[in-house]
Amino acid sequence: MGCKICSSSAQFANILKIMKITVTGGTGFIGNYVVEELLRKDLDVIVIGKNIQKAKNKYWFSKVEFIESDINKMPTDDIMHKIASSDKLIHLAWSGLPNYKELFHFEENLLPQYFFLKKLTQLGLADITITGTCLEYGMRNGCLTTDMLSDPQNPYSLAKDTLRKFLQQLQLTTPFYLKWIRLFYMYGKGQSENSILSQLDKALLENEPVFNMSGGEQLRDYMSVEMVAENIVLAALTDETNKLENCCSGKPISIRSLVENHLRTKEQSIQLNLGYYAYPQYEPMAFWGDVDDNSNQ
């Protein structure tokens, strides 16, 4: 008699092999790792991106079907039908980050994104995973749980939160599954040159005597980008569910400790000029996510 668990695992593996996943924003920091994670699972992957030259620099370019298109300008009908024929969509694309306070997030991004996704659901796409942001919680301090009402306080988080609410209303007339993944903070190879660890690495490379930073007392929730990608893919591959999820470690760490730990890992040192920059006004001083509180909508 065969092993029931082994048979189920083999059957699941076979399902994954024939599954087609489309990823928007696949050439971005997170998207690159998400595409890699999908390929590790032997999935059929379509990547939508604005810049094919950037995509050609990725090791995975020859392993996926890449389509050059700007979703904010509504792709052609043939591209839309191809995306809609996918089993699942992982939607990561969003222009203009990390300028959180700029009005273009809802003036230029929000409605094109909504109409792009709406048309896909009308064409039959039934399963969408989208990355949101921890900033949807607003200026709350402490542990953030998914049962809290959203309270966005800047244009970026307002646009993201509004997109989620638009899509939930759309679900009332056009059935599809929606997984909304609220990202916290992350680190890893390829991150923005504006991130604090990228700036620190640059200062070290250029043998700067001091590193200017804030007071470093802020508590944040950090996770490696590899783990973030794994969580996004896991959520996407979960069938027949609507989900609001925190993608986080659940372990707060101060910015100063993050910097000091990074220096120890690299076995380097630099004088920290604490208090040089003011604390950001669009973030609370201390917040982190609850990893045990992810819930169905």
Image (tube, rainbow, N blue to C red):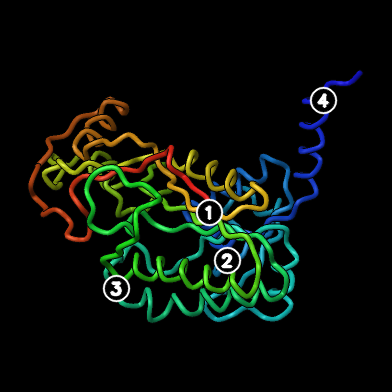
- Left or right, 214 with respect to 90, comes to left
Whole-percent x and y of residue 71?
56, 74
Judged from the image, the secondary structure of the residue bearing numbered disc 2 is strand
- Camera-near label (2 vs 3) is 3
Residue 121: image location, x then y, percent: 66, 71
Give left or right: position of 200 versus 182.
Answer: left
Do labels 3 and 1 touch, CB within 8 Å?
A: no
Q: Residue at x 26, y 47 (%)?
A: 196
Residue topped by disc 1: 31
Residue kind at label 4, given as amino acid type: Lys
* Relative to 244, 40 lies left or right: right
Q: Are marks 2 and 1 in contact (CB under 8 Å)?
A: yes
Mark 3 burial class by Cα count in 10 Å: few <14, some 14-19, many 20+: some
Seen in the picture, residue 65 relative to 35 is either above or below; the reply is below
Q: Earlier in the sequence, mark 4 or mark 1?
A: 4
Q: Which residue is mark 3?
A: 102
Q: Nearer the viewer, residue 160 or 77?
A: 160
Above-or-below relation of 234 to 55? above
Residue that badge 2 annotates: 49
